[in-house]
Amino acid sequence: MALLNQQELQNLRHLIGSHETASQKLRAFSQQATDPQVKQMFEKSAQDAQNAKQKLMSFLS
């Protein structure tokens, strides 16, 4: 795999941070939800954000 330049690395870090923030917020929303369907939707979205973060992090290794 080609080496990342500084701009690409910065963008990647930003995207990783954004997905982590989204995951944390969605988990918090899920914990506050009382409707089971809404709770499940937030949990799935949080997991999707976490999965996207992990995939982005794989570009760093």
Image: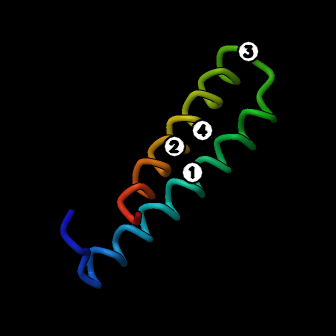
Residue 48 pos. (x, y %):
50, 36
Which amino acid lies under the numbered mark 1 shown in the image of this protein? Ala
Where residue 36 is drawn, which disc sits there? 3
Quarter occupied by the C terminus: bottom left
To which quarter of the image does residue 42 belong?
top right
Sequence-first tag of 2 and 3 = 3
Q: Which residue is mark 2?
A: 49
Q: Which residue is mark 1?
A: 22
Residue nearer the viewer, 58 or 15:
58
Q: Residues within 10 Å of mark 1 (few under 14, many from 20)?
A: some
Label 4: state its secondary structure.
Answer: helix
Sequence-first tag of 4 and 3 = 3
Are circles 4 and 2 on residues that touch, CB within 8 Å? yes
Residue nearer the viewer, 3 or 39:
3
Are circles 1 and 4 on residues that touch, CB within 8 Å? yes
Residue 7 pos. (x, y %):
27, 81
Q: Reply above or below: 33 against 13.
A: above
